[in-house]
Structure formats: C-alpha cells, structure tokens
Amino acid sequence: MSCVTERANTLPVQSNWRLPRLRRDALTVWRRNVMVWRKLMLASITINFGEPFLYLLGLGYGLGFFIGEMAGMPYLTFLATGIVAASAMQTATFEAMYSVFTRMVPQNTFEAQLATPLEVEDVLAGEMLWCASKALLSGIAILIVAYLLGAVEGVRPLLAIPVIFVVGLCFAGPALIMTALSPNYDFFVYYQTLALTPMFLLCGVFYPVDTLPSVVQSVIQLLPLAHAVMLVRPLIAGLEVTNVLLHIAVMLAYAGVGYYIAVVLVRRRLLK
C-alpha cells in the first residue's frame, strides 16, 4: 500500500471539497520545476525567441506592409501586443496540461510529493506558479523581440510584466482542470480545438474585436483572452488603459475557480 493510499484512507470523503489553503510549501514544488527546467533551458529559450520572431517577421512585416495601421498604431505593434497575451495563454496552458500530466501520471512525481508533508493544494499551487512563470518568460521574450524589431519603444512595456504573470495564472487554472480529468494526452485536443483556437482567432490578437458581429462580441467579453489583450495592449503601446479592475478580476476569477476545481478533482483522482 502506497503512502498516498494510506493518507487517503484517513481522510473523510467530504474532505475533497474543503477549501485549499495557500501555504509557502507551494514554493517547494515551484523550485523543483525550476531546477528541472534549467537542464532544458537552452531549447526552451530558443522556442521562446524563435516563434515570436517568425510571427512578427512574417505577419507583422509581411501582412503589415499591406495593412499599414490598425487601431491607431502600426500593424506590427498591434500584432506584437496581441501575441504577448496569446503566447502567455498558450505557454501556461500547455505547461499545465502536457507537462503537469506527465508529472502526475507517467512519472508519478505527484505521488512522490504527496508522500511528503505536501498536500494536493500545495502541489497544484506550485504548478500554477510555475506555469505563470513560464508564461512570463515567454512574454518577456516577445517584448525583447518586438523591441529589437522596432514594434515597441521606451520603458512603458515594462508595466505589462506583472499583468503577463496574472495572464499565466488565469489560463493555468482551467488547464489544470483538463489535466485532472484527462485519461491520456489525446484528451487535450478537445480543449485546444474548442477553447484555445477560437480564443486565439477571435479575441483581438490579429484584428479589433469591434469588427465582429455584436452577438459574437458579447460572447467574447466572457473569454479571458479578450480581457488579457484589452489590458496588455494599451500598457505596451502607451495608450489609455481602461477597466483595469474588471480585467484583473475576470482573470483572477478564472485562475481561482480553476485552481479550486482542479484541487478537488486531483484529490479524488490521487487520494481515492
């Protein structure tokens, strides 16, 4: 009988639904992931710089040559500010799904961590912090590329850095729910196709949302990437920022609700 199973036998069933406690022990999980990432750092950094460079070069310069300006700014700037938010979404989501699933199922890392004084909420809180950290690395890499290409300027884009971390938390929460429910890697295709791709195409990364039909605009206001773009873009481009508290509240709500549901599901999955 494993240590995790022994612990589960001492817990009442209703304890799966208790509210998680945020403890400093989560930093232990975050630090463990940092140490593992350092071994693969070169490949990760290459991807972080390579993909945005190709996007901004191909779409920003190529398509931007025909478009000129969009929403009062050069299209290269418009695209770069949207891709910062979209890249944070994709980085946090893929880390929370594929990497966390690998640690939870094939590698049994979660089971080893739960054999220590760590609780499920500590493990998932550490994973969320790590997902947001990787999203932040990705966002900073895009900002550097955009600066080198002349798409952004000055120190104003630095204001977006803490927001990018919040964007990472926002998308890590729902992705952890998918991971807790997933029987295998193929399951993630549904989330990518039905959630990530529509948000990537419709939430203002490539063109203003107000060009879409009013019904579609109303639906988009409920999606987290739309709020991330509406907050990150003006911060980076030096435009007036509006509805800051609303955008932050929506993203934190996705993060918090996603984290709680994921904790409940992982408790039921690992401590059954």
Image (tube, grey):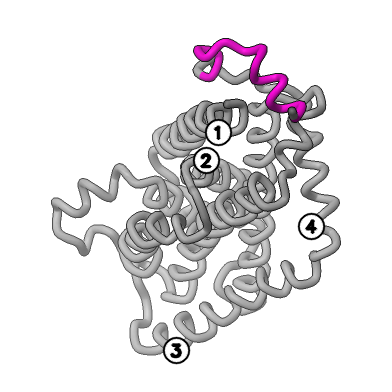
Label 1 to label 3: alpha-carbon separation: 48 Å
Which dot, 1 or 4, sits closer to the camera?
1
Is the Cβ of the residue at disc 2 closer than 8 Å to that at disc 1? yes
For the record, the magenta segment spans: 2-16
Which dot, 2 or 4, sits closer to the camera?
2
Residue drawn at 69 percent across, 48 percent down: 103
For label 2, the residue is 180
For label 4, the residue is 37
Helix, strand or loop status at disc 4: helix
> In the rendered structure, which disc, 4 or 3, sits on the residue that comes first in sequence?
4
Which dot, 1 or 3, sits closer to the camera?
1
Residue drawn at 37 percent across, 76 percent down: 69
Is the Cβ of the residue at disc 2 closer than 8 Å to that at disc 3? no
| Residue 15 within the segment the image draws in magenta | yes
Label 4 to label 3: alpha-carbon separation: 34 Å
> In the rendered structure, which disc, 1 or 4, sits on the residue that comes first in sequence?
4
Helix, strand or loop status at disc 3: helix
